[in-house]
Image: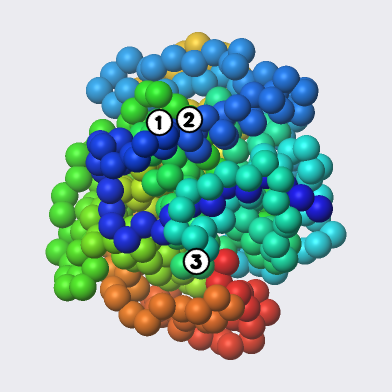
Amino acid sequence: AKLPLYTFKRRDTLLTTEKNAEDAGPGEVVSFLDSLLLGQWEDRMGKGLFRYDVTTCETKVIPGNCGFIAQLNEGRHLKKRPTEFQVDKVLQPFDPKKFNFTKVGQEEVLFRFEESDKDEVQYLDKAPVSDSPNVIAINVSPIEYGHVLLVPRVLDCLPQCIDTDSFLLAMHMAAEAGSPSFRLGYNSLGAFATINHLHFQAYYMALTFPVEKAPTKRVPWKSEKSGVKIFELCNYPVRGLVFEGGNTLEDLSDAVARSCICLQDNNIPYNVLIADCGKRVFMFPQCYAEKQALGEVEQEILDTQVNPAVWEISGHMVLKRKEDFERASEDYAWRLLAEVSLSEARFEEVKAYVLEAAREREKVPPGGVEKPVDMVEDEVSGFHSPETNVNDPMRITEQCLVLH
């Protein structure tokens, strides 16, 4: 079998979008990945592979200081695949009997996305498929223009769980696209991932996400080697952390990945947004599904049937009912997202352990297991069950043999 192949150069430094443009050599087009991805995506749209035409969905900016973006997407509600697993466990074993990305048609796959062994950007229209390729495929239930999925090592059948290598791959995709309109998102299980097969989502949105405009404050945190800086969101309905800087793309990526590993090993659902060409990463530990199960979410909010995943938390509200779209207000969006957020006390506790996990330490090899950072059970969050021992080697072996 053969697939189109895009190879990228490993980045040793964090480059700004402007520097990318200046450094482009003769004949190089900085937005080549953009052109390739969108050209392939539009080709699949022309072939009728999507479940609905997302370009006809109505979108508006909600009046107010935050600039929340509302989209009416009735087709996604009616035609999206249902969730097929428990929502109270962040780590669950891959189940080949349930839907996964090995079952998608080859026509849905746009191209492979691999690191170059020649340290050069290259595109081949047909190339032999490796044992377990990284693939970019269309999302057949799109939220926006150019909505795709990045599936690392697709044939390894990794469950939805971050590891350092896979997260670095997503960061390279953001940097390679070189467009601030292109963002990648990740939803853990329990935070509205609907498929338990490792994947990131990505799409184009010309408008600035509200979370990208939110004020931040620096978190005291020593990182002597990596140069990574961590900030806390201020005056935003969902409490979260923002990772920036780093001497290299890998420094920033590893700090975020270790933080993700800490959360998932301690059964805390979370969402991640990779923005600004990979130079800013937002992390949101969340508890909406838990509060929903406990009957603690307002009925008015539940009636909207909105599942606040990474895009909604970032301020792009995908609404399923016309009445919700027509009466959407900043107060409504704020109240919905506030239900997602951890309490201040719980967030401070989680933040302390994330900061510890993010420190430099020996990189986990592919297939290796990093000892989780233990977290104290807190009655604010029932997601970390008292019966679950995060240090139990049987639990790690069964559910996270590979940290994906």
- Asked if residue 332 shows in the view, the reply is no
**Which residue does the numbered mark 1 point to in the structure image?**
181
Q: Which residue type carries mark 1?
A: Ser
Q: Of residues 237 and 79, which is closer to you in this image?
A: 79
Q: Of residues 112 and 153, which is closer to you in this image?
A: 112
Q: Is residue 2 left or right of residue 289?
A: right
Residue 53 position (above or below residue 126): above
Gap between marks 3 and 1, in whole Å?
24 Å
Q: Are marks 2 and 1 in contact (CB under 8 Å)?
A: yes
For marks 3 and 2 on the same chain, the one whose residue lies earlier in the sequence? 3
Residue 196 position (above or below residue 36): below
Coordinates of residue 98 in the picture (x, y in percent)? 80, 55
Q: Which residue type carries mark 2?
A: Tyr
| Residue 108 picture quarter | top right
Q: Which residue type carries mark 3?
A: Asp
Kindly identify which numbered label has been placed on residue 204: 2
**Which residue does the numbered mark 3 point to in the structure image?**
165
Kindly identify which numbered label has been placed on residue 340: none
Residue that appears at 40% across and 24% down: 206
Coordinates of residue 337 in the picture (x, y in percent)? 41, 38
Q: How is the image coloured?
A: rainbow
Coordinates of residue 97 in the picture (x, y in percent)? 84, 59
| Residue 249 picture quarter | bottom left
Residue 390 position (above or below residue 143): below
Question: Label 1's element?
Answer: loop
